[in-house]
Amino acid sequence: MVAALVAAAAWQLTLAIGGAALGRFVTGLRGRPLTGVVLALVVAGLAFHRMLA
């Protein structure tokens, strides 16, 4: 029972730290343009897929 509690707490801590690091990167100077390019490619891919359907 204690092992499950420790495992759950460790997983939550991992998610929190990973989310904070990702948020810091995405809002940084290199992250914003990269996010814009990725989102533009996703939208273009969805539009292309829609054209073929």
Image (tube, rainbow, N blue to C red):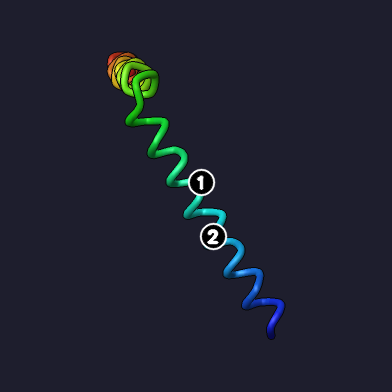
Q: Earlier in the sequence, mark 1 or mark 2?
A: 2
Q: Residue at left 38%, top 39%?
A: 23
Residue 52 figure quarter? top left
Measured along the vertical axis of the image, is residue 53 above or below residue 19?
Answer: above
The numbered dot on residue 18 is 1
Residue most toward the bottom?
1
Quadrant of the rendering where the C terminus is positioned? top left
What residue is disc 2 on? 13
Measured along the vertical axis of the image, is residue 22 above or below residue 6?
Answer: above
Within-10-Å neighbours for mark 2: few <14, some 14–19, many 20+: few
Q: Tag 2, which secondary structure?
A: helix
The answer to which of 18 and 43 lies nearer the viewer is 18
**What is the three-letter code of the residue carrying label 2?**
Leu
Q: Position of residue 38 (x, y in %)?
A: 37, 20
The answer to which of 28 and 32 lies nearer the viewer is 28
Q: Position of residue 10 (x, y in %)?
A: 61, 64
Residue 51 figure quarter? top left
Q: Tag 1, which secondary structure?
A: helix
Residue 53 in the figure: left or right of residue 16 = left
Measured along the vertical axis of the image, is residue 22 above or below residue 18?
Answer: above
Within-10-Å neighbours for mark 1: few <14, some 14–19, many 20+: few
Residue 32 in the figure: left or right of residue 20 = left
The reply to whether callout 1 and callout 2 are in contact (CB within 8 Å) is no
Q: Residue at left 51%, top 46%?
A: 18
